[in-house]
Image: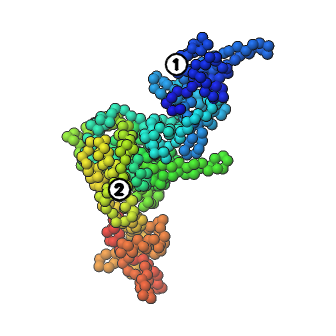
Amino acid sequence: MSIHEKASPLSLVGEPVAPAPEKLERPRYAVYEHPRTIEGKTYKAGTWYHGLKQSGPEEKAIPVDHWICTPLTVEAETVNSEDGTIGRLLSFSHRGRRIEWVMPMEALAGKGDEVMKVLLGRGLVIEHHQRRQIVPYLASHQSPNLVIATTTKPGWHESGAFVLPSRVIGGDNVRFQDSGKAANIFTCKGSINGWQTEIATRCLGNPVLILSVCCALAGPLLAKVGVNGGGVHLVGDSSSGKSLAQLLAASVWGNPGNFAASWDVSKGGVEIEAASRNDTVLILDEIKRADPKRVQEMAYAIANGTGKGTMTREREGRAKLTWRVLALSSGERSLSDHAAIGGSNAHAGAELRMVDVNAGNRTHRAFDEVHGMTGQEFHRTLNDAVAQNYGHVGPAFVESLIKQPEDLHSAFRHERQAFGTESSQAGRVADRFAIMALAGELAIRRKLINWPEGTATKACRLLFNEWLSTMGDGNAEDRQILRGIANFIDLHGDSRFSELRHSGTTTVHNRAGYYEVECGARLYLFNNPGLAEAAIGFNLKRIVRALQGADALAKVDIEAGQKRSNKSYVMPGGGKSRFYVIDPVKLDHEGAGQ
């Protein structure tokens, strides 16, 4: 039986009965989609209980008929793809609209109040005095022949369909399963034509806005191409327009006011938000709301796509939350600057997983082109537009990927060529910008966005090159080490170092080393503890490797034909000590102070 066909009346044990029986068998439950006349009595449409009532042992049983609710049909058995639990696909109508809900069988345990709450909340009309019949009716229903899969996570399902809470794209034998209490963030309003005219057209000439839309569209491509998650972080002063860029991205999938999430949650909260937007986009507002001590850890979690493991009361491991998503974050400070507020040192890996994009120092702050308006007028016009047209482009893009398949791996390799890098770390960031560019170009070619071809690639490449010119194409950990040493010298150059020749006349507390002057410039002689403190979080071997790569070690010793990374000095008071001799100019040359 198709899930769209209405179920025949069911006996108490669940066996189908003839649609118009000669005699009404009792006891049993029956569902009538339309008024039915049986044995001369007319029953209105609904779910009925036909029973027998006996007032005493010697009394003859008399028939009783109770109308329970409007027609409530058990369409199929469901099997959850994540944990294998069994449920039922229920359907009914409310104001002419067909409503579906996947009910887990475990919800029937006890009095089944949660089942009643969900059904009432979704519009099922129930006879109050007969409400306790709902659970026996559902529990007595034999397993339907039709079995479909369910998932608690939006996005691509193993069946090849793309599942959203309110619809399934590309398949009919899978459904989204939730508790019935969660808000549906994948809503729509207006039309795709309205979105194209009022929003997409005004993105032209604005790389930040174009990147934001492409970021929202790239989510469904991550699994198809094999690119890891991560994000971009729009950095700019307050009221620069970066929040508007996020609203535009959110409008691709739903109501911007509801679809956007917040940094103001725990790490577990971020995991839930990411999983609930799997294969789409995670919008995170002002980073200043985030806990500075946890923000880098949260960035890692978003990119890695796996939640923290937990245990049941039986000490069994629960299934971890998983997701694939690109995040679009914003803030007045970069991720590393915000982490520094909490006393945390910048992690190069976190900076690579949430890369900074300039959204504050452009021609009109976050905008490059305001299409003949003032910046304030442009902002207000777009802000009004996203409130009227949203939720159409993302699902339409997925539908086009299913109906018009192409070799996405080949398309990505071709797009990636526009984002040239040398190091593997910068290459991972280039992958992210390239997948966003590909998403935009695919949407253009499929007539979902009214931009000229090449628009998405040009904007994403521009912003990637801006990031590359700031961060460099080298190793991120090397940059972090060099920047840390340069900052240490700037902070403590005269308080924790003294000139080697006059060290006997100078008292230095908590000494990090000495300096010597050659050709009018200082060279800093770091002792082991001082160098480890300057690049905290890295061992000496790793620090030395970064200094060698930058050619920042000005003097070394050669012993037995081999170079040593430090140099031996005769101390003015007698004896010898070894120091790492660092040229600070080479640190600045590598962008350490940026």
At a point 32% along the width and 79% down the height, the residue shown is: 518
At a point 36% along the width and 72% down the height, the residue shown is: 550
Circle number at residue 34: 1
Label 1: element kind: loop
Q: Quadrant of residue 566?
A: bottom left
Q: Tell me where residue 132 appears, x and y as whole percent.
A: 64, 24
Circle number at residue 478: none
Residue 49 position (above or below residue 461): above
At a point 61% along the width and 50% down the height, the residue shown is: 317
Q: Tell me where residue 252 appears, x and y as whole percent.
A: 36, 41
Residue 78 position (above or below residue 355): above
How far apart are the two marked residues, 1 and 2, measured between alpha carbons? Answer: 55 Å
Amino acid on which disc 2 is placed: Ser
- Indicate left or right for 403 with 82 as reference: left
Mark 1 / mark 2, whichever is N-terminal: 1
Q: Residue tagged by mark 2? A: 410
Depth check, front residue: 461 or 62: 62
Q: Tell me where residue 116 appears, x and y as whole percent.
A: 59, 28
Residue 554 position (above or below residue 26): below
